[in-house]
Image (cartoon, rainbow, N blue to C red):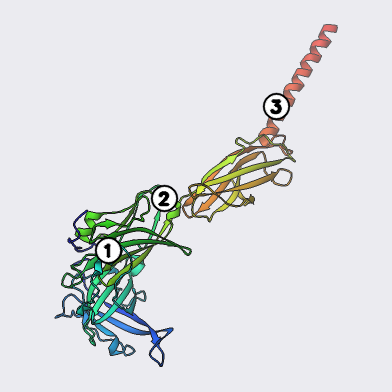
Amino acid sequence: VGAGSRLYLLHPVMLAGTSCPVLDCWFVQERKGRGGGLTGATSQEKSLLRIRRDAHSLGAEAQRQPASDISPDRVYDVTDPAATLCHPALSAPRGSIHKPQCEINPFLPQPSTLKWATALTDSALSPVYLQADWLSVSLQGLDGQLIQSSIMRAPTATKEPQVILSVSSKTVSVKSRLGEPVLLDCGFWTDSSSPLSGSGFAVEWRYQFRGDGRLVLAYDGKTDRLAEMQEEGATLDFEGLHEKGNASLILQEAKVRHSGTYICTVFLPYLLAQVAMDLEIVEPPSLSIYPSPLPLAVPGQVVTVHCEASGFAPLSLEVSWEFTGADGTSRSLGSGSLTGHRQAWDGTFSQRSKLELDTSKLDLGRGGEVTCVAVHSGGTRRASVTLNVIGFSTPSIEDSMAMVGVALVLYGLIKLVSWTFISGNK
């Protein structure tokens, strides 16, 4: 692990050489009551972010004037030295109705109470540097390519903020098979000119799913220590973390319990920014049919077939049956009788379907192929078994010809025996 004083260069998502967009945003904040207190309700106003790479220049696009329904107080000329806001996923094609999602909120710098971040603010005094207007910007790029959260500082009563901290991820939504390694991308950048960037950093990964939450991993970059609570099989690339701001989480072996939302939070003294991404473990079912082979059936008999789908995740599964006759035509036999789901020790699920084939009611001919079909988000699986029906009441052409042949042979034998008997008596 590198020394805590070595800080975060450019994360790969920050692409130099790309043009900086003008971002249409919503400025969201809590409304104040008559007495000055917060009412709990929120207000939102249209806003505009004009991005530039240094404080003394505005590109042609960034000089765009705001629409008439945007207040001048909600137009911000943002200085972004590392072009963290200039990713192509944040630039909508001209005339497109699909645009990046952008929300701006007021931000209040304060020391963290988490034990892996308290070392960042060991002084009880807040620096004068914090006396400014602070904003938090949350962004979601086109087609789920990028999520980003940036903290910006503007001198009091100005509309010219500068990006101080940016956290981003290119893995907004991830799917993985069981047992595979998983990489959840998270990168951060800090402005080296800020007095807050030289005092270390901390990283926290947290998991949430249906109201349940747990700490996955936390790292104090200032003291170079991992928190005591750490999920087995979860790690970071510590060299990349210190040298490139690569805070990506590595899960060495995907398990069903890993499905959920993961939140990557990066702490600086008095500041934090976070992004959330979804991981879904998807494992298709394994199918088995029994009995196999099926016993011979006669007309009027009921043949029972079972199909078991096992080892799948997530829970949703559709099971159906098909029958393919000797002539190659297929037809549906319905879903059969389904049992409830059962969960195995590894978190995967299993489910059974029972199909009763009544040969007196179903036109199954001389038999064919019975197929169990399981449709799952991980893929469709099929398993088949052969059904043979004997003593079928309507013989096929081949059977009729064979019966005629047998009758002719029998007739010939009878004639031969009869002729021999008559000849012997003479």
Which is in the foreground here, disc 1 or disc 3? 1
Whether residue 170 is visible here, answered yes or no, is no
Give x and y (percent) for residue 9.
19, 63
| For residue 412, above or below residue 175 | above
Q: Residue at x 50, y 53 (%)?
A: 376
Instruction: Give the mark, 1 or 2, whose residue is nearer the N terminus.
Output: 2
Give x and y (percent) for residue 63.
21, 83
Q: Which mark is residue 202?
A: 1
| For residue 74, above or below residue 228 | below
In depth, the one of 245 and 409 nearer the eye is 245
* Disc 3 residue type (three-letter): Gly
Q: Residue furthest right?
A: 425
* Disc 2 residue type (three-letter): Arg
| For residue 364, above or below residue 141 | above
The quadrant of the image that shows the C terminus is top right
Helix, strand or loop for disc 1: strand
In depth, the one of 224 and 183 nearer the eye is 224
Question: Badge 2 is on which residue?
Answer: 177
Q: Residue furthest front?
A: 124
| For residue 288, above or below residue 280 | above
Q: Quadrant of residue 4?
A: bottom left
Instruction: Give the mark, 1 or 3, whose residue is nearer the N terminus.
Output: 1
Left/right of residue 60 with respect to residue 216 in the rendered view: left
Left/right of residue 10 with respect to residue 112 in the rendered view: left
Helix, strand or loop for disc 2: loop
* Disc 1 residue type (three-letter): Ala
Whether residue 243 is visible here, answered yes or no, is yes
Q: Residue at x 76, y 22 (%)?
A: 411
Q: Which mark is residue 405?
A: 3
Q: Residues within 10 Å of mark 2 (few under 14, many from 20)?
A: some
Which is in the foreground here, disc 2 or disc 3? 2
